[in-house]
């Protein structure tokens, strides 16, 4: 049986760099030129036009991935509500 084709075949950069650049655009709502500057600080030189092509080609598959909800370690996934502000402050700080 033939293996499925690699979607990142014939690209200059590895898949990790492409997915990181796309995630910067979509998750943090950065412009293409901002992502270009962020990657340039790390030594990766690409143009914003390349970013635009990557987002056009791979952005839909990135957006279709389900988002993972991680509970905060402080509450262990338990939601606590208090009626008074002082009581909420004492629970957070560990006071009486």
Image (cartoon, rainbow, N blue to C red):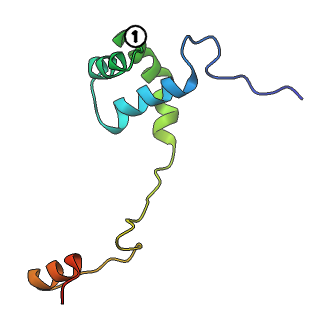
Percent x, y of residue 42 = 38, 20
Q: How many marks?
A: 1
Task: Classify residue 35 as left or right of residue 1.
Answer: left
Residue 39 vertical placement versus 86 (above, below): above
Q: Residues within 10 Å of mark 1 (few under 14, many from 20)?
A: few
Residue found farthest to the bottom: 96
Task: Classify residue 88 as left or right of residue 22.
Answer: left
Query: Which residue is found at the position 46% from the left and 50% from the top?
Result: 67
Residue found farthest to the right: 1
Percent x, y of residue 39 = 37, 20
Residue 82 vertical placement versus 59 (above, below): below
Residue 91 vertical placement versus 49 (above, below): below
Residue found farthest to the front: 95
Query: Which residue is found at the position 76% from the left and 27% from the top?
Result: 4
| Quarter of the view holding residue 81 | bottom left
- Residue annotated with mark 1: 45
- Quarter containing the C terminus: bottom left
Kindly state the secondary structure of the residue where label 1 is placed.
Answer: loop
Percent x, y of residue 6 = 68, 23
Percent x, y of residue 78 = 37, 77
Query: Which residue is found at the position 50% from the left and 49% from the top?
Result: 66
Query: Which residue is found at the position 37% from the left and 65% from the top?
Result: 72
Q: Which residue is at the front of the view, 10 or 93?
A: 93
- Quarter containing the N terminus: top right
């Amino acid at each position: 049986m033939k293996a499925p084709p690699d979607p990142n075949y014939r690209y200059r950069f590895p898949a990790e760099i492409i997915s990181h650049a796309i995630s910067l655009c979509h998750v943090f709502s950065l412009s293409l030129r901002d992502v270009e500057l962020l990657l340039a600080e790390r030594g990766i030189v690409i143009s914003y036009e390349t970013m635009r092509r990557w987002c056009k080609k791979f952005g839909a598959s990135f957006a279709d991935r389900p988002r993972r909800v991680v509970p905060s370690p402080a509450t262990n996934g338990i939601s606590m509500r208090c009626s008074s502000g002082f009581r909420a402050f004492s629970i957070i700080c560990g006071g009486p």
